[in-house]
Image (cartoon, rainbow, N blue to C red):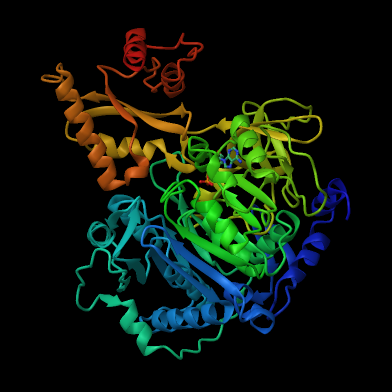
Amino acid sequence: MSSYAAFYRQSIDERDAFWAEQARRIDWHTPPQTICDYSNPPFARWFAGGTTNLCHNAVDRHLAARAQQNALVAISTETDTERAYTYAELHAEVQRMAAVLQALGVRQGDRVLLYMPMIAEAAFAMLACARIGAIHSVVFGGFASGSLASRIEDAEPLVVVSADAGSRGGKVVPYKPLLDEAIELSRHKPAAVLMVDRGLAGAAMRAGRDHDWAALRAQHLDAQVPCTWVDATHPSYTLYTSGTTGRPKGVQRDTGGYAVALAASMRHIFQADPGDTYLCTSDIGWVVGHSYIIYGPLIAGMTTIMYEGLPIRPDAGIWWSIVEKYRVTHMFSAPTAVRVLKKQDPAYLSKYKLSSLKALWLAGEPLDEPTAQWIGSALGVPIIDNYWQTETGWPILTLCNGVEPQAARLGSPGKAVFGYNVKLIDEATGAELTAPNQKGVVAIEGPLPPGCLQTVWRDDERFVNTYWKSIPGRLIYSTFDWGIRDADGYYFILGRTDDVINVAGHRLGTREIEECIASHPNVAEVAVVGVADALKGQVALAFAVPKNAAGLEAPEARLRLEGEVMKLVDARLGAVARPARVHFVSALPKTRSGKVLRRALQAVAERRDPGDLTTMEDPAALAQVKALVTE
Ligand code: AMP
């Protein structure tokens, strides 16, 4: 076992040698010729000249040694179903799905959009796309028609794979009407829609466009679809995420770099061995689901568990019962979920045998000390925070205990992960901050390591302009997070530098929510801010100026309008984006040059000192906000 400091230094100072070594963790059809082609910064082409396939590495590669081992276990407490697929069975299902997609016309490079609940068919579809070189784009099932439409329009999928419905807390959520509406709204029309019928809601099928998965699967039961060997730099998927502007960005990931990065992370971060069992409670609609429900654990030859349902239904012991039953070794979740469990009877944690569990990894939002301490002492295993983003695809900061076990520090997600040349940058001057305990923007010097975004889908310019800054002689990627680093190299994340908020680990752009609310006929202007919340980390609060305030004096009238606005957000963006409250004000606090003072709004809503307000146009506007939030 080497020391982590030396391991990390090698990853930066002898970059190509380091990654050439890691590249041996996956199968190549043609070995790479260049480890990192950075001749056109900030665009990095990892493992150029090599050809491989993500599905081969996740599935086929394991058939020789572990065909009869469970690869995927799909558990739903919503439909009370549980089904395990061995690697051999997964291989067969993925080939059936691949054959069906090919029959619908999908070829290498075509996009396939998935709008699906957490069911095994979603995993089959992702892996089937990877198998034939198609680019998948998974849209979180909690998004509604407007969000879905903008993603369909940008990704231009040839085929959409969906299901009749999802289910949450026992309540069926039909997907098909939202999908039909989204296709109606989108300028791009997919040629085909493949529907998985779960028998939950039924779905009106449009002749000529919509196809039934079960019927087509039956025609391809013996399908043999070989893996298409693609260039290491071939895009494997796009995944949309929110930023400062309203339009979501399609984060584009490669194939070879992603496979190598995940394989390296499974070893050095997770210490995963083939045959281990991984329970990640995220959703395939998020990056954590891509990397650590589907690809990472399968590349490592583990059994991965897909879970559809709430953490407290049928009771707060459900996850621990799964850990006991499947002898889960590795668990990955989010602080929000742990905070939800913390409010339940602690007896649920001692009811099950959890001796198989080696550690719990948490990510997606800051991990507060009480939460970390509570779950740590309840489980008796290490709790490992890890910080990363949709853009990077795998952790930027954590403890790489597979290299050298290191002590966690409360409040810190850990140290820079191998391959990431992490810097702190002074926001005003762009200078690198090298002394300990200084606050700066967390940044990564290019090239980004393997597995990170290649570009923004079809928008290289947006990729360069959004993320990259040059500081003399060097190009630096901004994470848009504030952070500090202590003298021992542990980082602490202090929140976003932009208008992105984090609600229960879900990343939302406040501008997107504002655009939606502003489309209400009686909203003249609106500002949405993220406000600290004990359970969800943050919630969105909206402050709206009505076009016509007459009749809004009565509290019932304001409540009615608030309800309408919330319904609008539910219908367009999805309930995940719904603000906790919509307050109606006569004016928004602005600077004299007309900029909304979002940080002041947020401070007042959090009952903090709003700081320097000398540039404020109308102090009465902020006073009104203060009165409303303390009401
Ligand atoms: P997403 O792209 O949805 O994964 O969101 C990424 C953002 O979530 C980061 O830029 C951070 O603001 C936040 N985040 C993720 N993980 C952590 C963590 N462990 N600690 C603090 N913030 C985090």
Depth check, front residue: 538 or 32: 538
Q: Is residue 81 above or below residue 343?
A: below
Screen quadrant of the N terminus: bottom right
Viewport quadrant of the C terminus: top left
Using the rendered view, name the quadrant where residue 562 is placed: top left
Drawn side of residue 330 relative to residue 473, left or right: left
Quarter of the figure with residue 514: top left
Q: How many marks?
A: 0
x%, y% of residue 240? Answer: 45, 53
State the residue at coordinates (70%, 72%).
26
Residue 275 or residue 194, whichever sits in front: 275
Left or right, 335 with respect to 275, comes to: left
Frontmost residue, 271 versus 582: 271
The structure residue drawn at horizontal position 38% and vertical position 67%, both measured from the top left corner, is: 157
Residue 109 appears anywhere in the view: no
Residue 457, compared with residue 129, is above or below; it is above
Q: Position of residue 612 (x, y in %)?
A: 50, 11
Q: Where does the image place residue 489, in percent across and percent down from the top left?
A: 78, 36
- Left or right, 121 with reference to 452: left
Image vertical order of residue 586 relative to residue 418, above or below: above
Q: Position of residue 18 (x, y in %)?
A: 81, 60
